[in-house]
Image: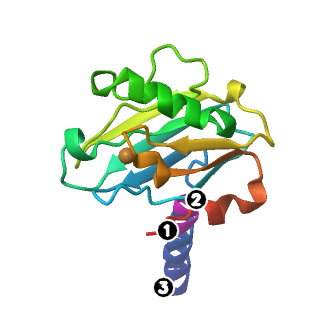
Amino acid sequence: MNNTTLLQLAGAGVLLLAGALAHADPCKLELTSNDQMQFNVRELIVPTECAEVEVTLRHSGKLPAKTMGHDWVLAKDSDMSGIITAGLAAGASRGYLPEHDARIIAATPIVGGGESATVKFPTTALQPGTRYAFFCTSPGHSTIMRGTFKFGDNSRLVRANEKTG
Ligand SMILES: [Cu+2]
């Protein structure tokens, strides 16, 4: 084996590594929330090939859950305001989420600064082409902390899941 071959092998290794990073599991999504009451993405897209979706919500801030807690809730767009109202009625002790509410497709618990939470759910409840929303149910947050969730629409997958800052 001469030096050129070794260099080629090393180069191939780097390419393989880059490929693995670029093609991270599209069924596992991650988003971040902060002390400024923001999610870092406005749109999440899951390809229809996913039988199960895993969403991890991180809180990159310092404020505790009591004052700046966030959750990640998924529902049909048309169910969002009803869930938020019911969540307010449920109150802080229930994490601002109504119990046993069939409209909620998935939800994480509320996290404070430095914490994270993960939720896994099957895609059997999702239909391609339906407009879904993700949002935070902490009081007043959903006016800013909301986004669109799509099942399918693979052509826009890479761009949409890119973090916006
Ligand atoms: Cu929030």
Is disc 3 in contact with disc 2, using a CB cutoff of under 8 Å?
Answer: no
Is disc 1 in contact with disc 3, using a CB cutoff of under 8 Å?
Answer: no
Foreground mark, 1 or 3, reads 1
Mark 1 near ligand 1 (CB under 8 Å)?
no
Q: Earlier in the sequence, mark 3 or mark 2?
A: 3
SS label for mark 2: loop
Q: Main secondary structure of the magenta part?
A: helix
As drawn, which residue projects farthest toward the bottom? 4
Amino acid bearing label 2 = Asn
Looking at the image, which is closer to me, 57 or 78?
78
Position above or below: 109 against 153: above
Question: Which residue matches tag 3?
Answer: 3
Amino acid bearing label 3 = Asn
- Give me the residue at 71% from left, 25% from top: 124
Name the image quarter holding the C terminus: bottom left
Within 10 Å of disc 3 (Cα), the crowding (few <14, some 14-19, many 20+) is few
SS label for mark 3: helix
Question: Which residue matches tag 2?
Answer: 161
Left or right of 60 in this view: 105? right
